[in-house]
Image (spheres, rainbow, N blue to C red):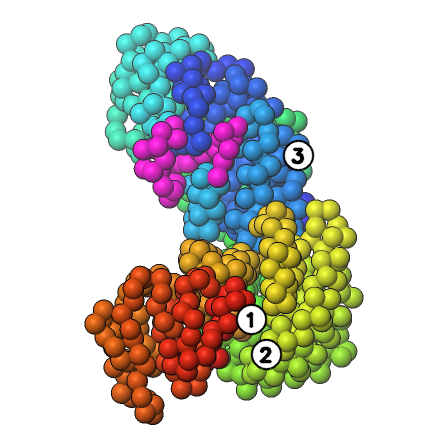
Amino acid sequence: MDGPLLATKLHPPARRAAVVPRPRLTERLGEPARLVVVVAPAGFGKTSVLAEWLADSDGGQTAWLSLDDRDNDATQFWRYALTALERAHPGVASAALAVLDAAPHSIETVLATLANAWENVDTEVALVLDDYHLIGSSAVHESVTFLVESLPRTARLVIASRIDPPLPLARWRARGELRELRADQLRFTPDETSVYLTETMGLELAPADAETLADRTEGWIAALQLAALSLEGRDQPSAFIADFAGDDRYIVDYLVEEVLGRQSDAVRAFLVQTSVLGRLNGDLCDAVTGVAGSAAMLEQLERANLFLMPLDAHRSWYRYHHLFAEMLRARLLAEARDRMPGLHRRASDWFAEHEQLPDAVDHAIEAGAFDRAAELIKAAMPGMQQQRQEVALAAWFARLPAEFVRADPDLGVGFAGVLLSSGRTEGVERLLTEAEAAPGSSPDSIRAVRSGIALYRAAHALANGELATADEQTEIAMGLAQEGTHLDRGSAYGLHGLVLWARGDLENARRAWLVSLDGLERAGHRSDVLGGSIAVGDILLAQGRLHDAEQLYRRGLALAQTSAPPLRGAADMHTGLAEVLRERGDLEGAREQLRAAETLGEHAGLPQNRHRRRMATARLLQAEGRAVDAIPLLDEAEALYTPDFFPEVQPIAALRARLLLAGVGWPRRATLCALGGSTPTTSSTTCTNTTTSRSRGCSWPKPTVPTTWPVCCGCSTGCLPRRRPAVAAEWSSRCSCCGRSPRSARGTPPRHSKPS
């Protein structure tokens, strides 16, 4: 979200003074569980029962988040949730928020940081997510699942939704970690219905009439509230109740008509016009309706129980009950459809004036004011891209007619960037071509658009393996960057370095990356500097320049430690140092660096460090003669691997193949010849391979014990069996092919010069 968070989303609802006590529900909510779900259709009192539970259980240790459809962006979702937790219990989410606001990150890393901090909290802290049915993002659902699985004993997550959330509820139910409140439990009992109608609403009803309403509404609280409002002032309530019939939809339609029909013209007009707003305050409603005095009207509506819910303790912001709001909007469509665009346009203007651009964009699109929406999206894009809210941007672009994107090159380039950042390449070239043909508004805008087009074309080509095109476009971007910002230069030269690296031109790739790192550092993008340092470090290692690689990683580590907590990328620097030290033979030093990376935690590493650290540990185990222990780490690395634009210079499959060729995990008494021969049996005495130019076969004497198989030292005339013993003691004293000693006195098996 661009700008500050909306504090009203973080305020739990106040408990109403006149409420029907429902201890059977609050006690259920208080039972120990990792997750509590409150699931029922609209109008069943989900939020109200949670408010009652909070009031009975000291809500000071409960974080509240009222969700809306813009929270489908995982980063925005967790920024709100973490802020709510931090307000409820200071310190529990501060580290996670710092990770979230740092450089590119994994949401799981953020949540792991949260779980670690939550573990140290002595008192119970609960997080309530209200209106979860508005969330349709699989990324959010997956992250919520991860958090529930990671919650410590002092933590609890409460979800209120109209539908079952797409989470593994069955698994948690089987473990006894789930508590549920559903429509059957939330319905008013006959006794609760009687108390509500006669005491809370102050109606004088015969017990039989209350029982009839309970039966007809089936305990649906919203319908009872509507019925009570319709009954107010009636001389013969029994007659009204006796004529009351129909299924739920018709009941609600009828009751709503009755409620609205009893309001004054001014109240009805206010309700219908302000139904376009997801949240209301006096000043905003004045702007939308064009009539002053909205703050007093909102207070009047709340006192009249007209489905208005306060969103903060000061009662500055409100929202309508969802069911009531939907009815009002349907009525507006039926009676005054032509007025809707003007209402939305005035709402958009108010939100833009108050620098709440996401709401301003939404209302401009609803108004059909697409030219205005395009301007607002352009204004919001830099901040939202910086906060990586590509999901929200993509949703806006999907609703904006294509001609408005085509007409504005900034929007076209921005949309292309949103697609590429989410791993989608279809339509990117079309957007860039249209942006290229669109007229620019100023010299600076034209240069920025041309630079963006070149960068995204290069990235698009690189993703498709089209290195010639990528090379050509990065040259254009670098030329334009000479007149641009430090960030422009850093971005262009970094992409150029990737192209050169993919071509195998390591030295020029290194030089391009050094220019990129200088631009990124001058621009203040320090975490991006650490990310670029990983690329340069890999190149230096491939060049055998261990001293330079070590110095690079140590400079990066010093940069990362200039802030507290360390910048994201600090763990990557430790992983890089471990690789350098392992190559030098300093295995203990490498182990210390990997321990340091693990101690910092996943949140201190960039996304690729999760699998890179495990790969580095696997190579260290191999060097220590413990190759068999490396295979599980490779399985973990594969599960955590996420592809990006970096060349895959250290593929997991390659290390796995080397370990398998060395015999890790293969039966000791069935070793394969690497040159293509068949598997020798216990009676074999010669190699059966006939496809090589060797004039003699390898000897395969029967092993006396499984640990004394003869092996080839890697000589040019020998065949390499696909198993290398894990320790020196397993090696025979001489190579079975050339007769030379495998130098087992060094304590590790010899290095094969020609592995197959």
Tell me how far mark 1 sits from mark 2, CA to CA: 8 Å
> Looking at the image, which is closer to me, 673 or 226?
673
Q: Quadrant of residue 699?
A: bottom left
Mark closest to the chain's N terminus, 1 or 3? 3
> Looking at the image, which is closer to me, 680 or 182?
680
| Residue hosting label 1 | 646
Image coords of residue 271 (percent x, y): 52, 35
Are the two marked residues, 1 and 2, in contact with CB atoms closer than 8 angstroms? yes
Type of the residue with mark 3: Gly
Within 10 angstroms of label 3, few (less than 14), some, or many (20 or more) residues?
some
Give the side of residue 647 with respect to residue 286, left or right.
left
Q: In the structure shown, which secondary structural element does the residue marked by tag 3 occupy?
A: loop
Tell me how far mark 2 sits from mark 3, CA to CA: 43 Å
Type of the residue with mark 2: Trp
Q: Is residue 564 above or below residue 456?
A: above
Are the two marked residues, 1 and 3, in contact with CB atoms closer than 8 angstroms? no
Residue pictured at 59% horizontal, 78% vertical: 501
Which segment is the magenta one? 150-179
| Residue hosting label 2 | 501
